[in-house]
Amino acid sequence: MDGLSLLNNPGECVSSTDQKEHPHCCRLYCGPPHHWARPTPAWPRCSPSPHPHTSQADLEEGRESGRDLQHYQSQAKQLCRKLNAQSPNRCTLEAGVMSFHYVLEHGVCYLALCEAVFPKRLVFGYLEDLQTEFHEQHGKKVSTVSRPYSFIEFDTYIQKTKKTYIDSRARRNLGSINTELQDVQRIMVANIEEVLQRGEALSALDTKASNLSSLSKKYRSDAKYLNTRSTYAKIAAGAVFFITLIVYVRFWWI
Amino acid sequence: MYIAFPGSYAESLVNQIINWQCCPRSLYSPVNCPNFPPQPSAGPAQLSPSLSGLSLQSQTPEALRVVNLLQERNLLPLGPVTPPTPCLPQDLQKINCHPEVFRSTLTSIPQTQSLLNKAKLPLGLLLHPFKDLSQLPVVTSSTIVRCRSCRTYINPFVTFLDQRRWKCNLCYRVNDVPEEFMYNPVSRSYGEPHKRPEVQNATLEFIAPSEYMLRPPQPAVYLIVLDVSHNAVETGYLDVVCQSLLENINALPGDSRTKIGFITFDSTIHFYNLQEGLSQPQMLIVSDIEDIFLPTPDSLLVNLNECKELVQDLLRSLPQMFGKTMETQCALGPALQAAFKLLSATGGRVSVFQTQLPSLGVGALKSREDPNQRASAKDIQHLSPATDFYKKLALDCSGQQVAVDLFLLSSQYCDLASLGCISRYSAGSVYYYPSYHQQHNPAGVECFQKDLKRYLTRKIGFEAVMRIRCSKGLSIHTFHGNFFVRSTDLLSLPNVNPDAGFAVQMSIEENLVDMQSVSFQAALLYTSSKGERRIRVHTMCLPVVNSLSDIFAGADVQAITCLLASMAVDRSVTASLSDARDAMTNASIDSLTSFRTSVLTIQQPGLLAPACLRLFPLYILALLKQKAFRTGTSTRLDDRVFAMCQLKYQPLAYVMLMIHPALYRVDDLTDEGALNVSERTIPQPRVQQLSVEKLSRDGAFLMDAGSVIYLWIGRNCNPNFLTQVLGLPNYAAVPLNMNMLPELDTAESQRTRVFVGWLREQRPFFPILHVIRDESPLKASFLQNMIEDRTESALSYYEFLLHIQQQVSK
C-alpha cells in the first residue's frame, strides 16, 4: 500500500488572537486558517497549480482526483480551526475512504491524511516521529514566530520520514513501533463530518442565543417606550379634562 | 494632521513658478545639486501673468536655458549626467523614490493628453525594482494597509484626513486607518499613524502574511542544462561552468530545502540520478527525443545539502565524461521540455548553456543569416523568431513558475532571435559570448567566469508577480522587459533578479485638472530563497503641470532615450529597422520643433534646445550607431539581436553606458576633485566627447562602454604612463591583447587601478579591459564607439544636427 498521502504544509502561524481562543493549539498545518480561503483581489490566483507535495501524492495514488484532494484540504483546514485545548490529543477521523489522523502535542498539531486501510499503527508512529523531531528542533521557537511557514525547512524531514513509512521494505525495520504503540487501538475514532458539524451546531446555537438576547433587548426597550407613551397619554387626558373644567367654570358657571 | 500640499491652488501655482525659478536642475553640476526649498511667500506682483512671464524671460531656469546646439560644441557635463529633480515640496522630495529605482521620462506630468501630444515627448517609467539595496526597511505586520478600492499599499504620499482616515493618492478613496496601524513600533508610541515606516519610506519591503500565498513558498530549485555535443566540448566551456559551480556551491542562495539537478544533451538527453545513498552519480540516457519522459522523477532533483558530495562528484567528472564525444547534433528543444517537466511541480530556475544552432527534435532551427548581406542589406530580416515553439514553451514555464536563463556561447550564428524567446517570456536573462573559446579567447573566458559567479551568487526571487499602479487618469499601455503579462497589468515573473530592468509607456486618459501631483507605485511580490514571501513596494510622486515650458523643464533626457530605445526595438521587430531608425530621428526632430514653436518666444537662428534636452540629438545619434540599430556596418545578426535584448531588459544606468560610452583621459589622473569612498581616493577625470579629435597621440584614454572597457594608448604616449602604469618600457612593447593592468607600486598605477575598479564595481557584470594601440584588431570596435565622428555609412554629429535643424525649421 503506497497510498499514504499527507497534507504536509508545515507552515504555521499563530496570531495572538488565535492563541487566546485555543491556548494549546498552534497549527502546523497552514497559516491562520480563517485567512486561507479568502481571495486576494490584488494578486489574482494564477493557474491552479496544485500544492507540489500533495500533487506528488496525487500521482502516487492515481485514483484520488484533484478535486477530492481539495475537499480534504478544506476539511483539514476546518478541523484545525475546531481543535482546542479540550480536544483529545490523539484522534482518528474517518472521512470516507480516507482518514485523518492527528497528534496534538505542546500546542502543535501534526495531521496526516491517508487511506482508511493504511495501518493506524504506522501513521501514529510516523506522527510521533515527526512530533519528537519537531519538538527537538523547533519546540522552543513555536511561541515566537509571527510569519507563516516559518518552519518550512522542516519539510525536508517530513518528506524523508514519509518515504520510509510508505516504503514497504523499509517498514519492516520499523518493528519497534509495534511494541511502543500497543495502545494505538484505544485512540478515539470519530467521523470528520460529525466533528465539523458538532461545531457548526454549537455555533448555530450560539447565533440563536445571541438572536434571542438581542430580541429580548428589543422587547424591553419597546415595552419601556410603550409604558412612557401611555403615561404621557394619561397625563394629557387629565390636562385636557382640567382645562375644560376651568373653562367651563370660568364662562358658564359664573 | 498631514497635508501633502498646503495652501490653495493659486498659491501653490505661485509656489510652483518660484520653485521652478530657483531650482537649478543643472545637468552640468558634477554631483547631485540639492533642490532649493520653495520660497514660502510671493509678492502680489508675480500673480499677474504678464509680470510672471517677464520674470520667466529674465530668469529662465537652468533646465530651460536655450542652447544653440550648432554653436556649443562641448555639451557633456563634467561628471555623470544626473537625473532632474521633480519640483515637489522639499519634504516630499526628500522621501521620494530613488531615481535609480524608479524614473519617469517627464518629471513634470502634463495635465492633459493634448498637452503631452504637443510636447512630442514620450511618457513612461523606467524601473529597476529588484536592485540590490544597501538599506531597505522591512516591515512585519499581520495586516498590510492597502486602499480598499484600488489595493494601493499605504505610502508616504497619502493624505491623513484625521487620526482615523487616510486618502489614497492613486484613486482618492478615503479609507479607515486600522487599529493596529495606530501603534508605531519604531517609536513605540500610539496615535501617530503618519510616523509609521510605511509612511516614511518610498521604498520598503513587507513580510507577506498567508493571504499572499497560493501555495507554500517554494524552495530554491536550480536546474543546469548543458550542451555536451562535440562543438560544445570543443569550446571548453564545461570546465568553467563546473569549476564555477564547485566554487560557489555553498554561495547559491537558498536554505536547507534547496534543490539542484543536472541535464546534459547532445542528440539524446542525459539525466543524472543523484539520490542520497548512491556511491556515485548515475547517468540515465533517454534517446526518445520525440516523446520525452523522466526516467526516475524522484531522484533527478535532489536536496543540495544532503547530496552535496554526489553533486560535487558529478561536477568534477562532467568535463571529462564527454571529452571524446563525436556527436555533433544537438536537441535543445527536447532538453528544454525535459527541464520543464522536471521543474513543473515546484518551479525554479533553469540555466541553459548552448553553443550551436539546435538541430534535432522540436525547436530545431535553420541558419537564416547570409553573412554577405550583413553590410549591404537595405533592411535587416529575421529579427523575429523563426518558430513559436520557444515562446509557447516559455509560456508553459511561466505558468509553472519556471524561468529559463540562456547562456549562448557560440562562434557561429545561433538564431538568438528565436532562442531568446525562451528567456524573454519566462522572465529569464540572456547572456551571449560570441566566439567563445577556451584557448583562442581568454578575455571572453574571464568575462564568462565573472558573469557566472555573479549569476550564481546574486539574490533571486521566485514565483514573483509585479504590478504597477498609477494615479487615476493615467494608464499604462505597453511594457518592456522580460516577463509575461498575465492580466492587463500584472507581470508574471517566475524568477526575478537584481539585474533586470523594466520600462512602461503611459498615456493620460483623463485630464489631471485640480491635481497637484500624481503617484506611481510598483509592487513586487516574491518568494525569497529562504522561503519567505515578501512584497517590495516602490512609490514615486511627481508634480502635474499645465504649461509646455514646465514639461520641457522636467524632461529627463536619459530616461527618454532608454524608453525610445525599447520602443524602437519593438518597432524594428514588428515593422522594420529603417522604420525604427526614422522613428527615433523623428522623435528628436518633433520635440525640438515643439520646443521652438511653442516655448520659445524669441526666434533665433540655429538649432535651439532647452539645456535639459541638449544631449537628446547626441543620444539619438548614438542609438542610430548602436549595434542594435546600425546599418551599413557589418553586424552579425546575433550581435544585433543581443544588443536589442539588452536595450529591453537592462536597467537604465547600464543601457546608457551601452548607448553612449564614457571617455576619460587617464594618463594625467590627479587626486583633484576625487571621490572618497571607504578610505579610497577615486580620481574623477572629466568625461570627454566621443570624437577622434579628442584623442591625442601623447595621451592614454579609457573608454567605458558598459560591458567592455578599452584603454587606448597613443603612439607618443607619455613614457611615464607606460612605465608607471603598464610596466612597459615603450609604446612598441604594448602587447596586442593585453587584458590586465599590472599591480605596480606607483601612485599612477594605484590611481588607474582604483579608477578602473570603481567603474567595474558600479555594475553587476564584469566588463573586460582591453588595452589597445593602433595595430590592435579591436581598434575598429573602439573607433566605432566614436559616435560624434563620421563613418562611411553614418553621419557625424554635426551633420546630424544640420539634418535636424533643416527638418525643425521647415
Image (spheres, rainbow, N blue to C red):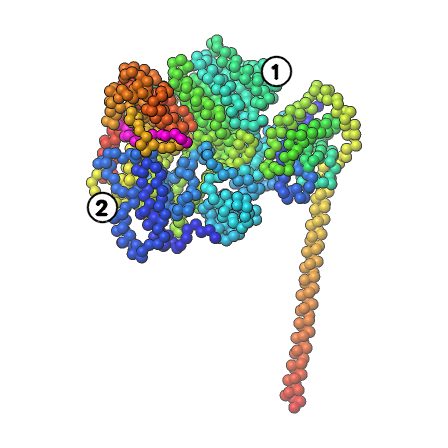
Question: Left or right: where does residue B232 sit relative to residue B141?
Answer: left
Q: Is residue A239 visible?
A: yes
* Outermost residue to the bottom: A254
Question: Could you tell me which chain the residue with mark 2 belongs to?
Answer: B
Q: Nearer the viewer, residue B176 or B341?
A: B176
Magenta residues, start to end: B678-691
> Tag 1: residue type?
Leu
Alpha carbon distance from label 2 to label 1: 84 Å
How far across and how far down the image is residue B419, in percent?
A: 44, 23
User: Which chain does the numbered disc 1 sit on?
Assistant: B
Quarter residue B752 falls in: top left
- Mark 1 burial class by Cα count in 10 Å: few <14, some 14-19, many 20+: few
In the picture, residue B278 is in which quadrant?
top right
The dominant secondary structure in magenta is: loop
Tell me the tag on residue B602.
2
Q: Is residue B803 left or right of residue B108?
A: left
Percent across and percent down for residue A175 are: 75, 22
- Taking depth in this image into account, of A250 and B577 the one nearest to the observer is A250
Q: Residue A15: x percent and y percent?
A: 62, 41
Identified at 44% across, 20% down, the residue is: B449
Name the residue carrying label 1.
B278
Please tell me which residue lies in front, B733 or B551: B733
Q: Residue at x 67, y 76 (%)?
A: A237
Residue under the image location 51 percent in, 31 percent down: B461
- For image coordinates 67% across by 68% down, the residue present is A228
Label 2 neighbour load within 10 Å: few <14, some 14-19, many 20+: few
* Residue type marked 2: Ile
Vertical placement of residue B329 versus A181, above or below: above
Q: Secondary structure at mark 2?
A: loop
